Image (cartoon, rainbow, N blue to C red):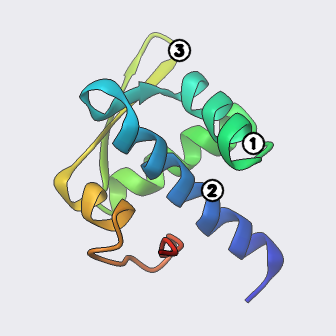
Amino acid sequence: MSFQKTVTEDRRLSLLLVLAQSQGYQANGFLLRDAIGDIYGHNASIDQVTGDIAWLAEQGLVTSRVIGEVTLATMTARGADVAAGRASVPGVKKPTP
């Protein structure tokens, strides 16, 4: 596995973990970018975050909608299962206990 693939999988897990702790299980891309940087050390661009949100939505882990220039992500039940380690999806790092 390449280093970049490992970073991407960890960043996606980080996004799910932040959403799991967010009110209403939702947050916008800018807040998610800042949170994964502050909490998990990911120095991600807004393009990377919105790309990850789109990818997570394709997997059924979040829903997303664009309001103006802001992408809003909302965690699904399947996304919550992945964040908690109850389910796994290739492309998202499995959380460690």
Question: Looking at the picture, does residue 79 appear above or below residue 46?
Answer: below
Relative to 66, is 54 above or below? Answer: below
Question: Mark 3 or 1, which is nearer the eye?
Answer: 1
| Disc ID at residue 11 | 2
The residues tagged by marks 3 and 1 sit, at their Cα atoms, a distance apart of 18 Å
Residue type beneath disc 2: Arg
Which percent across, then down, holds residue 69? 53, 14
Could you tell me which residue is drawn at 56 percent across and 32 percent down? 32
Q: Residues within 10 Å of mark 1 (few under 14, many from 20)?
A: some
Identified at 35% across, 51% down, the residue is: 57
Q: Secondary structure at mark 1?
A: loop
Q: Which label was assigned to residue 69?
A: 3
Q: In this image, 49 relative to 83: left or right? A: right
Q: Residue 28's mark? A: none
| Residue on which disc 1 sits | 44
Query: CB under 8 Å between callouts 3 and 1?
Result: no
Q: Residue furthest top?
A: 68
Q: Determine the secondary structure under disc 3.
A: loop
The residue nearer to you, when weighing 68 against 87, is: 87
Residue drawn at point x = 77 percent, y = 47 percent: 41
Disc 1 residue type? Ala
Lower position in the chain sequence, tag 3 or tag 1: 1
Spatial separation of the CA atoms under disc 1 and disc 2: 8 Å
Q: Secondary structure at mark 2?
A: helix
Q: Position of residue 23 (x, y in %)?
A: 31, 25
List the single residue furthest toward the left. 77
